[in-house]
Image (spheres, rainbow, N blue to C red):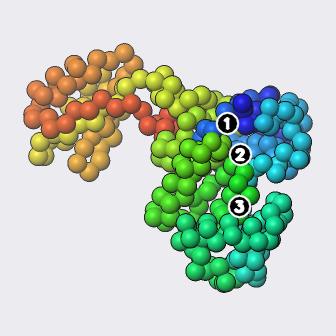
Amino acid sequence: MQAIELLKARKTYDQFVAVDDLSFAIESGTMFGLLGPNGAGKTSTIRMMIGITLPDAGEVRMFGEPFRRELLRRVGYLPEERGLYPKMKVLDQLVFMGEIHGLSAAEAKKRSQAWGERLDIADHYQKKTQELSKGMQQKIQFIATLLHDPEFIIMDEPFSGLDPVNTRLLEDVLVDLRKQGHTVLFSTHRMEQVEKLCDSICLVNKGRSVVQGELREIKSRYGRDRVLLTFHESNDGHFLDTHPLVDRVSRYEGHIQVQLKGGSDPQVLLRDAAAQGQVLKFELMEPSLEDIFIDVVGKTDA
């Protein structure tokens, strides 16, 4: 079953088209990345999914049926903007949010305590929200999103304000939820997290889908046209700058990354590199999601 489906959804604000006939579907039990540059229409799309705004055209389907507000009891939403009450104690706030989603006060408190222990924040439950750091506030909002055990979880920039340790902690939670059969959609600018966590993606630009599908299949379309090179000692691979097979050269501390021209044989480049000096490493790489993002967005903008 599909947790959510957009069918040619369109949203305009005055003369500005925020979402332009966008279609995609998210299978239940998967993790899905909604990506795009600033102003691409990601948040507008999410708002249509959960009924904050209505599409001007097209359709939103949730759990296999046309969207209706009653279905939101099965949905958890973490907005990009903070939505906590600054002067309210953390535990009281979580219990209140649990009750909004249909939990009893006792059950909401029990679940809040369990999540607080798991995310290492229970010691701060008697503080007011305004006394917490941005990272801690993000963890509290994360808990509030999951408290009622939603089937479909929507997270807009969920790792904002978090240090690497807490980012890893929340990533592990999302992976566990997917293993348990929950569906997760998250929207983020951090390509490495999408690459690590997501099964499928939709990359939007100017309100339209420009790339979508399973991440592995998308990468296979672009082939392995990037080479990572490391030379012995001071060789900087200067010959690569004018090599007929090379489209672009990027030099980093300790290694060189080369973008090959279409149809180039990397074995020819390896032979020529070996003729220039000792090659310590020659690795043919698939493109990263960041490479694909830059390539696709750059072409559509052009």
| Residue 224 in the image, given as x and y percentages of width and height | 37, 25
List the residue tagged with mark 2.
152
The residue nearer to you, when weighing 192 against 150, is: 150
Give the image location of residue 80, x and y in percent. 69, 58
Up the image or down, 222 lies above or below 147; here it is above
Q: Is residue 220 left or right of residue 58?
A: left
Q: Earlier in the sequence, mark 3 or mark 2?
A: 3
Residue at position x 39%, y 19% in the image: 262
For the C terminus, which image quadrant?
Answer: top right
Element type at marker 3?
loop
Disc 3 residue type (three-letter): Leu
Secondary structure found at label 2? strand
Residue position marked by numbered label 3 in the rendering: 147
Rendered view: 142 above or below 34? below
Q: CA distance from mark 3 to mark 1?
A: 19 Å
User: Which label is found at residue 28?
Assistant: 1
Separation of marks 1 and 2 at Cα, in angstroms: 8 Å
- Callout 2 environment at 10 Å: few (<14), some (14 to 19), or many (20+)? many
| Mark count | 3
Using the rendered image of the protein, determine whether residue 52 is visible from the camera's viewpoint: yes
Amino acid at pointer 1: Ser
The answer to which of marks 1 and 2 sits earlier in the sequence is: 1
Determine crowd level at label 3: few under 14, some 14-19, many 20+ residues with C-alpha closer than 10 A: many
Q: Amino acid at mark 2?
A: Phe
Quadrant of the snapshot with the N terminus: top right
**Callout 1: helix, strand or loop?**
loop
Judge from the rendering whether residue 77 lies leftward or rightward of residue 165; answer left or right: right
